[in-house]
Structures are given as C-alpha cells and as structure tokens.
Image (cartoon, rainbow, N blue to C red):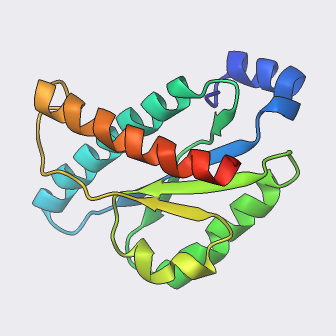
Amino acid sequence: MQWTKSDMELYVLEKEYVDTLVIPLIPLYTEVDSTIVNGAFQRELNHLTTHLLEKDYRGRILLAPDYNYIAENYEEEIRRINQWIEKFNNQPAAHVFLFTFDTKWKRWEKELKGHLLWIPSMSDRNLHSSETRSYVKEQVLQMSELIKAYWE
C-alpha cells in the first residue's frame, strides 16, 4: 500500500495483514550541478524500485513516504530515522526495511532500527529504457527474496 488517501483508508481497515514497512531513503545533494542531476535520477530510480516492490506485495507491504536527508551528517540522520521507525511502531509492522542506493548507509547499518536494503545504483540513464527496466525488475526480485526470508 502506498501513502495515498485511498490506500491509507484501506490500510486502516486491513492493517492486521500489513506486516512490512518499506521506507525509501532519498539523499539531497546540492553542492555540484552533476550531483544534483545524479541525485534526482537516484530519487526517480528509488521510486520506480519501491513502487514495483509494493505492487508485488500489495496488501502486505506499506510503502512509507520518502525519508529525505542531506547527505552529510549520517549520525544525526540515524537518530531521526530511528524516531520515524518508532512512530511507525505504533502500527503493527513486524518488519521495517530502509531502501537506498547510498552506500554510506552501510557504515551505519547496525545502528538503524530496521533492515537496510542497499543495492548498487546504475549510472544516469533513461528510466524508460528496456535496460533500466530490466535492471530494476532484477533488483526487485532479489529484494523480494530477502524480504521473504524475514517473513519465514
């Protein structure tokens, strides 16, 4: 389920069946023009990936709003992300996954109150190309296998 009014209305009625929360981690880069463009592409790729994952497990996964952060002070962001997760713990989500392409999160993974799903990003490409779509589908398949392992 996505963070939309109609899905949240359904979620409120059916939340006992939704046991998994996925939080997209979206970095904000503003230093150099090339990082702005690459950051925007990563955001779009993150959305494409997480929406495909949610679609595959609609009714079991709740896709949270994006968690946007400035990619500088990860220690501070850990505190904020963990606060988000604690707020979501008021809902019956047994499994929390944080999805990102940002490799820097791997260093801080053990301090997160959720499971980090990190996959390598691809370089700036056309999101609508068959190569990009194929890559995303393969990554979603691998993420699905990992998430299912936590469900067992």
Q: Quadrant of residue 70?
A: bottom left
Which of these two is toward me, 151 or 108? 151
Image side of residue 87 versus residue 49, left or right: right
Image side of residue 96 versus residue 75, left or right: right
- The furthest residue to the front: 152
Give above or below for 104 relative to 64. Answer: below
Q: Is residue 129 visible?
A: no
Give the residue drawn at x 62%, y 73%.
112
Give the residue drawn at x 73%, y 67%.
83
Residue 120: give x, y in percent of width and height: 27, 59
Q: Quadrant of residue 80?
A: bottom right
Give above or below for 1 relative to 41. Answer: above
Residue 42: give x, y in percent of width and height: 28, 49
Which of these two is toward me, 107 or 95? 95
Residue 14: give x, y in percent of width and height: 85, 23
Q: Quadrant of residue 7?
A: top right
Q: Which quadrant, please, contains the N terminus?
A: top right
Label count reads 0
Q: Is residue 11 visible?
A: yes
Give above or below for 90 relative to 114. Answer: above
Give the residue drawn at x 59%, y 42%.
65
Residue 98: give x, y in percent of width and height: 54, 57
